[in-house]
Amino acid sequence: MLQFKLVLLGDSSVGKSSIVHRFVKDSFDEFRESTIGAAFLSQTIKLEKQDDVTIKFEIWDTAGQERYKSLAPMYYRNANAALIVYDITQPDSLAKAQSWVDELKNKVGDQDLVICLVGNKLDLCEEDPQKRVVDTEDAQRYASEQGLLFQEVSAKTGAGVTDIFQTIGEKLYVQ
Ligand code: GDP
Ligand code: MG
């Protein structure tokens, strides 16, 4: 069994904790309380493409608020992977995600850290396409320019959530 440390970063209310809960507990809570400081959870998966390989993710779910920003380096230092989450219905959240990408690249460099850009709340746009403010193509283009993995998800329906961890797990396994 391989163990990897994974950290979630992004603006508050984009759905970081909801993504972790969907992945770890396969549940969703409309009224999730906002994270204080950071929360630790873990989950084990079997890689679909190499089914004899089990990967344990040790997950640090950070609080997005500005007042906790100085704590973030404690969680991303020594991380093997980072999910940088934005909300596809919120105009500022991609820009915030991009500033996290810059910070990670400055502070930890590119050294084997697998970064995945994650656009959350896909269900809201499926209900009402007018709610989308971040185009898939724009985020996808930015991610490939920066060498990031990219996935749109819904923590609410679960769409795309396990894909993130499968893709990251495979990348960590081969590198
Ligand atoms: P965090 O601050 O980034 O950890 O965000 P939370 O996980 O606490 O979620 C913030 C709010 O967005 C909560 O009210 C969640 O119920 C809601 N939320 C999170 N993910 C989704 C999603 O995929 N779809 C919808 N419709 N709401 C979501
Ligand atoms: Mg949270």
Image (spheres, rainbow, N blue to C red):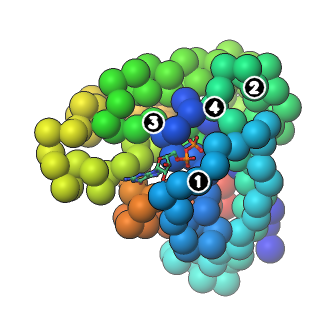
Q: Amino acid at mark 2?
A: Tyr
SS state under label 3 = strand
Of pointers 3 and 1, the one earlier in the residue sequence:
1
Which one is in front, 49 or 133? 133
Left or right relative to 29: residue 107 = right
**Res 137 visible:** no
Residue 107 placement (x, y as % from top left): 74, 19
Q: Give the residue number, with chain letter if any, for mark 4.
A: 64
**Res 93 visible:** yes
Q: Whole-Å distance between the Cαs marked 2 and 3?
A: 18 Å
Q: Is residue 122 above or below residue 132?
A: below
SS state under label 2 = helix
**2 or 3: mark nearer the eye:** 2
Q: Whole-Å distance between the Cαs marked 3 and 1?
A: 17 Å
Which one is in front, 23 or 156? 156
Q: Are marks 4 and 2 in contact (CB under 8 Å)?
A: yes
Q: Is mark 1 within 8 Å of ligand 1?
A: yes
Residue 86 circle label: 3
Left or right relative to 174: residue 118 = left
Sort mark 1 into few (<14), some (14-19) or many (20+) by Cα contacts within 10 Å.
few
Q: Give the residue number, with chain letter if any, for mark 2.
A: 68
Sort mark 4 into few (<14), some (14-19) or many (20+) by Cα contacts within 10 Å.
many
Residue drawn at 76 percent across, 64 percent down: 42
